[in-house]
Image (cartoon, rainbow, N blue to C red):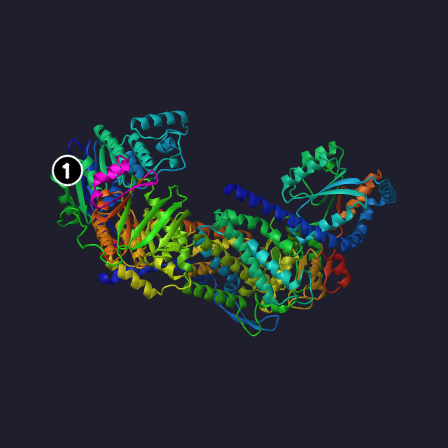
Amino acid sequence: MKRKLLSIVMASAMTLSLVACNSGAADTAKEAASETVEEATEAVSETVEEATEAVEEATEEVTEEATASGDLIKVGIINNDPNESGYRTANDADLKATFTEENGYDASFAYSLKNDEQIAAAQTFIQDEVDYLLLSAADTAGWDSVLQDAQDAGIKVILFDRTIDADESLYEASIVSDMAKEGQTAVDWLAGQNLDTVNVIHLQGVMGSAAQQGRSGALDEKVAAEDNWNIVVQQTAEWNAEKAQQIVQSVIDSGKEFNVIYAENDDMAKGAVAALDAAGISHGVGKDVIVMGFDCNKWALEELLNQNWNYDGQCNPFQSSYIDEIIKTLESGGSISEKTIIMDEKGFDAETITQEDVDKYGI
Amino acid sequence: MDDNRVLEMRGINKSFPGVKALQNVDFSLNKGEIHALMGENGAGKSTLIKVLTGVYSKDAGTITLEGQGEVAIHSPQDAQKCGISTVYQEITLCPNLTVAENMYIGRTKGNITNWKKMSEDADKLLSLLEIPAKATQQLGSCSIAVQQMVAIARAVDMECKVLILDEPTSSLDEQEVEKLFNLMRGLKKRGVGIIFVTHFLDQVYEVCDKITVLRDGQLVGEYEIKDLPRVKLVAKMLGKEMDDLSDIKGEGGSYEGADADEHIFDARELQSNAGIKPFDFYIKKGEVNGFTGLLGSGRSECVRAIFGADRVLKGTVKMHGKDVKINKPLDAMRNGIAYLPEDRKVDGIIGDLSVRDNIILALQVLKGFFKPFSKAEAYAFADEYIKKLNIKTASADTPIKSLSGGNQQKVILARWLLMHPEYLILDEPTRGIDVGTKVDIQKLVLELAKGGMSVTFISSETDEMLRTCSRLIVMRDRKVVGELSGEDLTQNKIMSTIAGESNV
Amino acid sequence: MSKNIKNKESLLKRLTGNQLFIPIIAIILLAVINLINDPGFFKITPVINNAGNTVLSGYLITILDYGSELGILAIGMTLVTAASGGQDISVGATIAIAGSAMLRVLCGGQARPTELQAPIIVAFLVACVVGMLCGAFNGMLVSVFKIQPMIATLILFTAGRSIAAWINNNELPIVPDPKFAYFGGFIPGCPIPTTVFIVIACIIVIALVLKFTNLGLYTQAVGINESSSRLNGINPTFIKFLAFVILGLCVAVAALIKVSRLSTINYSVIAKDIEMDAILAVALGGNALSGGKFNMWASILGAYVIQFLTTTLYKFNVQSDALAAYKAVVVILLVVFSAPTVREKMNQLTKKVKPAKKEVA
């Protein structure tokens, strides 16, 4: 009896939590959708041109046909849990806003942070005979057989945000961010500040993640190459503001000199700034310490606008317009010239950022 | 070493911080002998047993076993390998395993268990020893007595040469005790040496061949049973001469107030969810009455219903003639009822708390959550009762669990006396405690009654009940079947009422 | 002479017998390590922070400041452990819930309000109610339905952060008023972190409660022997329930500090893994995790030992994702040293040493 009761309570709690996630996500999606999508489409249109130039005209025709006939394109979208991060929330909202019936799509969504659950979802979509399978894989390995099944069933696969370890022939395209490039852009910016010495507190993300590896790599190389670049402390704060605050606090307490905070996401930069504030160390444009973050959260860009921070690197979550373009190209019989499409990503400088940028790129 | 000797312990010393538990104690055991180890609580019986079974390591002395010479026993496993098996007062088996599993656990050969053979072997042994249990039955579903017998069966099957029975009978009723004795006699014929630790004098004289008496960690002597009549045994244990446990009733007279006929507590058709038939019950001011009957006849359940310890299903209760509701222990306490429970370890002591906290607990709860006693008050209460009841403890701050059983019981008694109840229920207050304390408690009960307190007294030892109670309620099969008082208060009358031979 | 030795021995014994012994030794050990490594560790210097206040700065201040949440949680966790013989593993998640509720009230559901939508005290009281409701939920499962505490609290542990996100529609609101940051930072004109005062207040409150009520006695009695407590008129169900509700209140206070530190919240990482630290604090305080007797002050001290350790490890530049491994080592040492077999061995060892000493004397 007791056990039964427990299981009922547990089950209802879990259901509740699921409902909570989804309704939350849906609400955000609604709000965010109207703002983000148009802007995102604009933002990316420049780069897509390269890849899809050849078939641009055709695409438009096909879209018209598709919508006119009322024949919706069936897509199955497998993503990570939108609660995972602000990035993912924006990403999910962007997808939801693009793949609507008005735009000619019949989209189903599946969320999980676990690879096996994602694979199971993919199999369901294959059985449902979707036309396209859009995938942001939780893990790089283990996708070969299910993607082979998809190919056999005539389903086209497009990867977004994350790549996988599978043969290129199994998917049509992969739309990704280049984390190393993001890191390089940031490091180049920092080098452009022409500081006499660069003493960096380097706050890393969860070790081994693609974003951490890419964003750490560029800085590590530069520090190794230049004599006047030093790492004061290199620590993982695991994307966590509280940990970042403690790490920076510890450096301050030790009395070591530093003039740059290189945080691999905005949250950690925020934690670091909290520690600086408590210790009376000035930061921002023209101040003692340069603060750098990544991801372009709206609140982070606002800090830039207020000149409290110096730099924020973008990690573009708006892949849906790229995907949309590709699907339309394929539907019209065109082909994709490049399998891997790297999205355009900016780096913002506090001295040049505008309110427009904040509204447009903030997630 | 004598050919007939199976065990010889010489010059055993063992001390704990601040206490010399054993000083130069000798003990020897012959083949096919049942040897009683006697002494008050704290005399060193348990320590000696624990040294022998490797639970404690001895400070000095030798242990010699037949055919093995001097042995070094460092752990219970060593003891088992030497052929020394122990059955403790508390069941140390696993209630959630089957009987057969309990009998063979930890001693199957190799990694593969032949379950079928194990069950068959177990059943064979169980029927040989006439133990009413099935091999595949879950141990927890057997009565405590049967569990104890299974523990003995396990020990017997391990081909032990020395079997130690530590208070095996304290939770058994008379028929079960008789069965156990038959079992012991059977083992004796097979040449097993049995060390029997008990508080029941009757049982010692019924089944034992020899007695070794300890007092204050020292050996008093080893005697043939025929050379040591009861009176002398008690005298040796207590270290003073005493005229047996003679009649102590009437020593001080009974309560003689004008309100001696008032019904302090009166219950009609009382029934709890513990499976007893509805019963009527009353007690007068200054009266000592008792529930008697076989173990499991519902004695404890009746008093638990009175105290609200089990869920009360129906019935009306009056205190001093006024209707009251007693649904939980706190209700009973507010009405001046105190209850010393049957199982001291499970329901009585709060082991890790100090003697002081254990003493003040009931009164403190009665006083209220927001009105704690000050430290000084608490110490005063504790010290008063430690002195009054002669509780042997290092200090009031000592955790109660480190006291001997008898002293723990006195602490629980102190807890309830501190509440100054009108009506005190004592459920088996003398179980598992030494003779001296037993007499103390019986005397105390009579004294309290003389002072006007009403007491309900339950004991498995009929003679104890006869000595203290002026009225006995007899129970059989969870039902009140009779009431005895005055002339009818004799051993025979009780027996016949319990047995249902006549309903006088 | 020999009497003198005996006195010394008994003093030593009294010292080692005291529950505060383990955490104090741990603190001394950590302090000595730091002293040898860098005497500057103990330097406290006044600095002017970016809000223009003179405040104290240094490792010791950092320990006092960042150990606050843990110290407060240790209070509630000690009671829960003592009463129920189990631990609440949902405190991290319920901090997220209480913090989220606080932000919801302060920001009125907007992501970036320009001014406070409700007074801070109202928001805090709402958070207290929410925290106590979470505690009551856990407490009910444990006390009424007799579910093991770890299992019962697993529910909120799993669902809590999602609920927290749901309360604010997945937004991450930022509190606009700098006054809100006082609770996790400094009040203008006071050089000592506000969190220190909050902890002191909590300690005073719990000390008064323990002195002027029977909470301590009842909790210990229930934890040691529930059946016996019931027969003495205590209501074990209520006491266990109460312990969880008190922990809920501690959670709300900890949430105030946590949220105030950054004036915002991140549902997935706020107070992450703090439940394990809180349980470790109770264990470090020498309290049995199986319940029963407890020493509140030892637990609180234990919390600061953990923060001391964390800060020391940061100072030695240990990778922060390896911190858990070091804490695990501490847990292993604790468990090993409190195991009966080891204690007995140690006793034997000291016994062997003693006679040798006497001969020398």
Q: Chain of mark 1?
A: B
Question: Is residue A353 rendered to the left or right of residue C25?
Answer: right
For label 1, the crowd category at 10 Å Cα-Cα, with few meaning under 14, some 14 to 19 and many 20 or more, is many
- Provide the secondary structure element on which disc 1 rests: helix
* Residue B498 picture location, percent across and down: 28, 38
In the rendered structure, does residue B252 fall within the stretch colored magenta? no
Question: Is residue A340 rendered to the left or right of residue B256?
Answer: right
Quadrant of the rendered structure where residue B385 is? bottom left
* Residue B70 picture location, percent across and down: 21, 37
Question: Is residue C261 rendered to the left or right of residue A72?
Answer: left
Q: Residue at x 21, y 54 (%)?
A: B254
In this picture, which residue range is highlighted in magenta?
B476-504
Query: Is B353 located above or below residue B104 in the figure?
Result: below
Name the foreground residue: B196 vs C29: B196
Question: Is residue C303 rendered to the left or right of residue A22?
Answer: left
Quadrant of the rendered structure where residue C234 is? bottom left
- Name the residue carrying label 1: B225
In the rendered structure, does residue B503 fall within the stretch colored magenta? yes
Query: Is A287 located above or below residue B437 in the figure?
Result: below
Q: Is residue B479 visible?
A: yes
* Residue A67 picture location, percent across and down: 85, 43
Instruction: Name which residue type carries label 1.
Output: Ile
Q: Is residue B8 visible?
A: no
Quadrant of the rendered structure where residue A259 is? bottom right
